[in-house]
Image (cartoon, grey):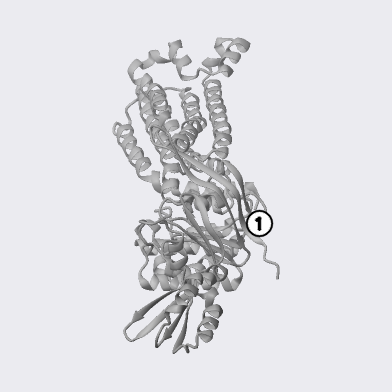
Amino acid sequence: MVSTSVLSFQRVHKRFFVGVRRKAVQALDTVTFAVPDGSVTALLGPNGAGKSTALALAVGLLHPDRGDVHVYEAPPGRTPVGYLPEAFRGPPAMTPLRLVSWMARLRGVTPSAARSRAAEALERVGLTRRHWGRPVGKLSRGMQQRVGMAQAIVGMPGLILLDEPMAGLSPEGRALFHRIVSEERARGATQVLSTHVLDDAQRLCDHVVILRKGRVKVAGALDGLLGPLGTVIVRLQEFPETLRPSLQRLGGKAALHGALWEVTVPSSSRTALLDALRAAGVSPLQVEDQPATLRDLYDAHRPPGEGAAA
Amino acid sequence: MTKWRQTWIVTVLSFQSGIRAAWLPFAAMFALLAVQLYGGAGDSLSMKSLVSTHGVWTFGLFMTALVLGLWAPRSDIRNQFLPILSAGGVQRTTYLWGRVLGLWAVCAAAALAMTPVWVLLARRVESGTGGYVLSLCLEQIASLPAIIVPGIVLTMAFRASGALAILTGDLLLRSLAPRVLGDAWERVDWIDWALHPMPLQLSLDQAFGRSSFEAPWVLALVAGAQNLLWALGVLLIGGAWLARRDVVLR
């Protein structure tokens, strides 16, 4: 199957001028990445990395200074997309049912069907009928976030952009959002998820883009990126010192843990290590593969001294 | 979806939210005027009293329109209604048109609802004033975009209300001049020029002579048309400018 990109950034630059002195802040610098059709892509990075700016460019709220942003191979704004902004509040006087109905109509749903589609979307995000008629401004933070999610998914948009969707949600709310993201993936929607929570991203996403200070540090399919970062731990009764030079060449290390030696090498050196051990006449007691996590990938691109992500 | 349908949707949304935001000040104004005007039922009204009261109403109406115009886009940005409309495919200029039309409809509905009251009251003053008062009402309705549009555009553009001082000055002049100057206000040319300093008036003045302005319907139509043109000009230029710049998020 040929994977085409639904959203693409080509050498995008975006600069803001802030404050009275109009100090220039480079929000995005030569950003290039593509979001494949049907994927769930995590947009990761510390605060100020440019995640929300990238999503605002994809929606068409901002325009790039240089470079191109394309949504379905056209400039943003031509095709309606689902969008949950960060810390969604919504028009305070409008009821959830009315807001979601209007968003359905903007996505081409007929007026007669809009109300039932809206009701369906509100039910999916766990809002009961008693919430439908209450003004959005009177709902709790978590409920407002659910209304935001409902308006993002109503009308079955092909591309859904979610900016910090789990912020302010209870564990039950987070579980519900996980389920919705999975359901939308099953439907075939392409999703971009900006988040600070690496565990959420690891569970939900199959592609990742890590931004730092407006630059793309790494982008691609999660499997392909995590594979080389995995490790193999081989436990031995004893470790012959003659193997240490070979181990250093393989990028591994050996340490005594209790009564056993643990030899750790990157997954890519697994075969070479086992061959070397066999040649030295050492039999491994246990071989344990440790796949890399998204946290390993994130930390691998984190400058020393910067705090860890959640 | 066509731009017309998008504009219609934003207009309806704008109308609904505008009604919710403005019903209280409008109700308060209706109540105040009812008390003021019907308090002396049966007594004859002086023209000066009628025009002054109408000035107060106009001031209230225009201030409400101004606050709505200034408040609406700020509110839409703060509660992220504008971003989700953009995601729904609504362009910035479409949003502006819809917002302006919706808020205009809110204030025009209030002005229209009040028009019969003015006509009834005008009948208590003297014969022939009904047309004059109606012309004032018409001018109000036509002038509303001149208040709403710059409010919306400038609020979106600068986030600070740079237009506030200018518009408030204009409003004060329009509303308070009759109160301050009494019957004389209509005869003072400089106020007329200050209120309607537009080329259209100059052209009409030269083409038809000064007398053309003494007919209240003509005055109302000319003033309304001028204000409307000005508002549309601001909307078109401001909207085109906004569409090209990132003035919403930063």
Mark 1, other Cα within 10 Å: few <14 / some 14–19 / many ≥20: some
A203 shown above or below B37:
below
A283 shown above or below A113:
below
Residue A145 in the image, given as x and y percentages of width and height: 41, 62
* Front residue of B182 and A67: A67
* Front residue of B220 and A243: A243
Residue at position x 49%, y 55% in the image: A211
Q: Classify the position of the C terminus of chain B by image quarter.
A: top left
All told, the count of numbered labels is: 1
* Front residue of A219 and A66: A219
Residue B207 in the image, given as x and y percentages of width and height: 63, 11
B92 shown above or below B141:
below
Q: Which amino acid does label 1 sit on?
A: Tyr
Q: Quadrant of residue B67?
A: top left
B85 shown above or below B236:
below
Residue B95 in the image, given as x and y percentages of width and height: 54, 44
* Front residue of A164 and B36: A164
Residue at position x 44%, y 34% in the image: B158
Residue under mark 1: which chain is it in? A
Visible residue check, residue A120: no
Q: What element carries label 1?
A: loop
Visible residue check, residue A130: yes
Q: For mark 1, what is the residue?
A: A72
Residue A56 in the image, given as x and y percentages of width and height: 51, 50
Residue at position x 47%, y 63% in the image: A149
Most distant residue in the right direction? A2
Most distant residue in the front direction? A242
Q: Quadrant of residue B179?
A: top left
